[in-house]
Each structure stands twice: as C-alpha cells, then as structure tokens.
Amino acid sequence: MTESLQTDVLVIGSGIGGLYFAIHMADHASVTIITKKESSTSNTNWAQGGIAATIESGDTAELHIEDTLGAGAGLCKRDMVAVMVEEGPQHIRRLMELGVQFTTSDHEQLHLGKEGGHSRSRIVHAQDFTGREVENALLARVNSHPNITLLEHHFAIELLTEHHLGIKTNDITCYGAYVLDSKQRKPKKILAKITIVASGGLGHVYQHTTNPDIATGDGVAMAYRAGAEIANMEFIQFHPTSLYHPKAKSFLISEAVRGFGGILKLKNGQEFMHKYDKRQNLAPRDIVARAIDSEIKKSGEECVFLDVTHIDAAKTREHFPNIYETCLQYGIDMTKEMIPVVPAAHYSCGGIRTDAMGRTTLNRLYACGESSCTGVHGANRLASNSLLEALVFAWRSFTDIREQLPALDNSVKFPDWDDSGTVNPEEWILVSHNKREAQGVMNDYVGIVRSDLRLQRAQRRIEFLKDETEAYYKKTKITTQILELRNIIKVASLIIESAVKRRESRGLHYTTDYPQRDDKHFLIDTVLRSF
C-alpha cells in the first residue's frame, strides 16, 4: 500500500517563490510543502546580490522596464515585465513586514546597489547574503503557521494526471504528485486540488555551476513528462564570475562586486572589457561571460581575475562580508589581491510556460520562480530580477488560486505506486558515471559558445545516456540519485533540442554557425511539449 496524503494545495520546492506563496495561501487553505533536502537548501539561499525594485526617487518603472527589455534581447514579454516591475516594490514592503532585514543607509533608507545592465541603483539587498536573509525570515513564518505542513526529504517523482488512470487526453489536469520519502525509502501519493511547482533551477545539468546540489531541473522534467509546455530552454545564463579554486565548490562572486567598482583583468593586470562593450565591467552577464570565455581561450589560462584592490578595504569588507570571509578561507584576501574567476552555469531563463497568473498549460498546475517561464527574462535575465519575478508571480498565483479553490475537489482515486519487478540498485557506478558524463557533455558542447557540430555531438551522447538510464530506472527501485539523473538527462535533452531549433545568436544563446540575430525568423519563443 502506498501511503496517501490529502491537501488543498501542494507546493513543490522551498525557495522564495514556494515559501512566499505558501505563507499567503495558508490563511485560506491547507498547504503542504515538499522539499527534497532540508527546507533551507535552495537557490534562493545562495542568492547574494539582491532584489531589483524601483524605490529611489530618481528611478522609474519605465527605466527598469527598458533595462529589462534591453537585456532580454527582444524576447521579453513587455506586459509581463511591466507587471513584475510595477508590482515589485509592494513585495519588498511585504518582505520587511515578514521580518526580512535589508541593509539600510546612514539615513535609515534602504541601501540600493547597482548591478550590470541597470541604469540606476535599485538593488535592495541584505549585505551580500540577501537570499539567506529572505529564506530564513520566510521559513520562520512557514514553521509557525498551523495550516502549513513542511515535509523535508520528499522528492516529487511524477505529477498525477489522467494518464495514470489510463485515460488519453490532451486536456490534462494535475491532481498532485507521486513522491519519494527518501528517509523512509517509501513512495507516497499526495492528492491536491492545486499543485504549484517552485522547485528552482537546473545548474547541475552542467559540470561547473554556482547552484547548490539540489538544482537538477526536477520541476521542468516532471512537467514536460506530464505534457506541459516548456519554453526557451536554450537560454542558460552563465554567471561570469564564480570563484576559481579547486575547493571552492559553487561559490559565486556577486554581480554587485562589479557594480561596486570591481574590474576584470588578465593575470598580468591588463583590463579587457573595453574591447567587448562600451559599458565595460557593467555590461550584461552574457556579454561578460563570453568576453571571459574568449580571453581564457586566447590566453590559454584557466581563469581571469576580478580586482577590487583599488577600493577602500574597509568598505569592501563592509559591503561584502560573506564574499570576503569565503575568499579568505581559500587564502585570498580580496582587499589585497585579485580574485580568480571563471564563468559557471547560473540561471535558466526558460522553464514551464505560464501566463500572467502563474497558470501552466495543464489544468490546476501552476509554476513560479526559476522553474517557470513567464516571459520576463526573454533571452537573458537582468541581474536581480529573479527573486523579484518569484515574489510577484507567486503572489499572483495565490490570488488566482484563492478564488478557484472552493469549487475544486481532490477526490479522484489514483493507483498505488507500482514498483513490482524492480530490485534494489547495485550498480551505483552507472548512476554516478552517467551523471558526470551528461554534465561533461553539456559543459563541453552546450555551454557559452555553441555550434551545429557541438550540438549534434551532444544530442547523440545524451540520447544514448537517456536510453541507458531509462532501462535502469524501469528495473530498479527508485532513489533520489536515480531520479535526479533521469531529470538531468531529460533537461539536458530539452536544452539541446531548443538550441538546435534556434538558428541564430540571441542573448544567452550564441552559435558560431549563426552569429547574427535574426528577428525575421526567430523573434519567437522556442516551445516544446512531449505530446
């Protein structure tokens, strides 16, 4: 017997979008949050920079909109961007009411930083660990709310739809999810009137990433298998400056360091960004990442350097205590020596396609945050718009669901999880090897600079790994490791397929075979659906 749970709303993920949604939803319904590791393990928790918001008197929503559209290289949906920008400031106030302590200036006003691609200082932050501050405040509210059940170490396997009942239809409805309790090693059914996917990013599809280990694209893979539309997966943002050190796993040097006056240099101290963009060190991330990639290839060096030694050391330590202390742990005093940096997979602009209320193309299924594609990022996300997007569309999903919920039920009967004929996994080497191989293929062939030849090679290798992994999955009892591998390979194939379809260079997608932007043929989203 598969244990069965019922809830009004199921939230998959415990980042800023899922938690912010749950806090407001729980005043109107029972909410169950599942997260595959501990509740604080999320991309939000690792976000250093901050939240972009038009708060300063010299700033306007229109300026923020234009900056976002400029970074998005023609693919942003202007109406969605306007919604995000115009509604954003109210959610900064709500976060403060929920206990978030943002950094203030001498006059007790919010201190606003400036980052690449922004024409004004508008980044609300909590020193250089904004994500952690927001996550902790939201978790405290979640843990004290009587209508919220938070289940740690629960991994969503598949969304429950009519297809599990043997019904073939294109008008698909989501009724919850099959879930693995990884501590008890038992599958469960969670039946819900509404399900919202807020499971975060997919950085670990790549070998080098700034994301925590949990970022394996689970929500996107799961929604695609269930029949939801997935959009713009080719646009993977590589953070230009992750710390280059053999022991510094997944640590990024915030965009705000360049906004603070940091200068990118070669090993010999020579500056180079002026050769690539008139904005130099404040150019958008895709331009900076390609510039660094180009300089590394030309020089044969393994990294470039970010220099803040010309800035007052006390100010550097005050603004970036977390980065300063972390660099010190690896023997680097950023106030006295340059920081070695390389680009790393950081953020996915694509995801589960949604409308302005967070609705996906499946009935009763919503998505928010990095696992969604609302259209606000287009072909390249503007710095610090990600947490803003998660807040705004999590709230909009809440307001939409609140109106619908009374008319819905979750009484459909679903079969137990069937693992008959499967055995306990013995060949762990297959799982770990296939994961490393998939990540290596993506890093080598589907990275910052692409080509038809590279994408074709990647497609063949990922297809082979998919066939091998699916065969293993079908005969083996499920584990977190197998589920993550399966999702990584599925998401990798979606990224490659989307990149192959886009025969131009735009934003984060750059291919040597089609180096020009082609608005005539490709000023459109790349949309994929499994059936």
Image (spheres, rainbow, N blue to C red):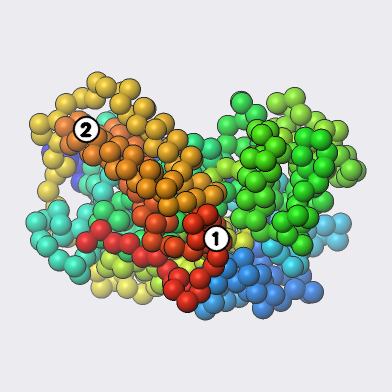
Q: Choose between 49 and 282: the one closer to the eye.
A: 282
In the visual, does 174 lie left or right of 117? Answer: left
Q: Could you say where residue 27 lies in the image, as x and y percent from the top left?
A: 43, 63
Q: Residues within 10 Å of mark 1 (few under 14, many from 20)?
A: some
Q: Mark number for residue 399?
A: none
Label 1 belongs to which residue? Answer: 515
In percent of width and height, residue 312 lies at: 90, 43
Amino acid on which disc 2 is placed: Tyr
- 151 is higher (above) or lower (below) than 503: above
Q: Report whether 226 appears left or right of 163.
A: right
Image point (74%, 68%), residue name: 119
Q: Residue placed at 50% from the left, 61% from the top? A: 514
Q: Nearer the viewer, residue 47 or 437?
A: 437
* Residue shown at 38% from the left, 61% from the top: 501
State whether residue 137 is above or below residue 76. Answer: above
Residue at which label 2 appears: 472
Please say if 37 is above or below 229.
Answer: above
Q: Report the Cα–Cα distance between label 2 and label 1.
A: 40 Å
In the rendered image, residue 223, in percent from the top left (x then y), is placed at 31, 56
| 486 to the left or right of 513 | left
Foreground residue among 343 and 428: 343
State the quadrant of the N terminus. Answer: top left
The mark total stands at: 2
